[in-house]
Image (cartoon, rainbow, N blue to C red):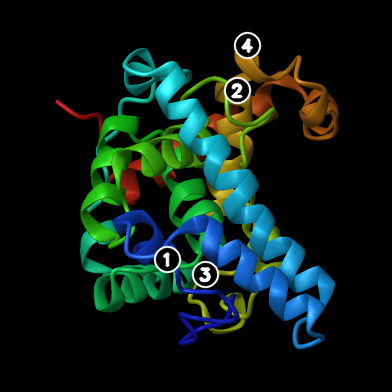
Amino acid sequence: MAAGQPWMWHGMVSTSLNLGLIDPQEVCRRAEAEYRSGRAPLNAVEGFIRQILGWREFVRGIYWSKMPEYGARNAFDADRALPWFFWSGDTDMACVADAVRSTRDHAYAHHIQRLMVTGNLAMLLGVHPDAVDDWYMVVYADAFEWVEMPNTRGMATFADGGIMGTKPYAASGAYINRMGNYCAGCRYDVKLKTGEAACPFNRLYWGFLERNRARLAGNPRLAMPYRTLDGWDAARRQALVEEAEACRTSLGAVRAG
């Protein structure tokens, strides 16, 4: 991710594919032809085809095999409203402001922004999955329910309880810092874990894990962060929950109703 760089090296074909303007099989065959002619490297072509032939068709299968029950799943009993800055971009979180700005200006954001910035934040905040689905459906030109819902209710928020993926893609500010250049110019300090000056992703992360311990602690892919939590006493863990709650409130993720 890079501030002010909405396109990066992405193919920009998802809208045309999902609208039916271009054929997925033809796109895959043309990409393969570029590799065989020596004009494109194998790793780029393999990744491109895998996203269409593999991931996109997997998402389609999940939707048509699991609906309509899938659309009512809410594994974490998330009940918070979507903060207004998801629409306005009016936030001091540099990564979120840039992702929303790209979304607003282009009806597009690349998949890391959708999954690990806006989606991750919505999950950590405990936003109701219906509100998350609605937002993604409204703001992105490539969003059709069959492709949008499994990616948001499944991948981004883990509201499906693990049908799409084996663990929630929850991450603190450290991940965002490794993946992009937002943190250097952000008002919040990615190195701080608590307090109003700390990165909100940090303030929310540990409280999210502790709040959802009953559902997630047995997940082997989350063994490391839960070992860390288990090394802290009950008072410290409770303080993390309270820190996360204060952050949720300050960001406008109040209980919907």
The kind of residue on which mark 2 rests is: Gly
- Which residue is labeled 4 in the image? 214
Q: Position of residue 17 (x, y in %)?
A: 40, 60
The amino acid type, in three-letter code, at marker 4 is Ala
Among numbered discs 4 and 2, the one appearing first in the sequence? 2
Q: Residue at x 63, y 29 (%)?
A: 209
Q: For the residues carrying marks 4 and 2, which lies nearer the camera in this image? A: 2
* Distance (Cα) linking label 2 and label 1: 25 Å
The secondary structure type at the circle numbered 2 is loop
Identify whether 239 is placed above or below 42: above
Residue that label 3 marks: 188
Q: Characterize the local packing of mark 3: few (<14), some (14-19) or many (20 or more) Cα atoms within 10 angstroms.
A: some
Give left or right: position of 7 versus 142: right
- Of the numbered discs 1 and 3, the one sitting upstream in the chain is 1
Whether the residues at callouts 1 and 4 have beta carbons within 8 Å, the answer is no
User: Which mark is nearer the camera, 4 or 3?
Assistant: 4
Q: Quadrant of residue 1?
A: bottom right
Q: Left of 96 or right of it: where is 136?
A: left
Pointer 4 local density, CA inside 10 Å: few below 14, some 14–19, many at least 20 = few
Q: Which residue is mark 1?
A: 96
Q: Which residue is mark 2?
A: 162
Q: Amino acid at mark 3?
A: Tyr
Distance between the alpha carbons at the discs numbered 3 and 2:
32 Å
Residue depicted at x 68% and y 54%: 50
Q: Is the Cβ of the residue at disc 4 closer than 8 Å to that at disc 3?
A: no
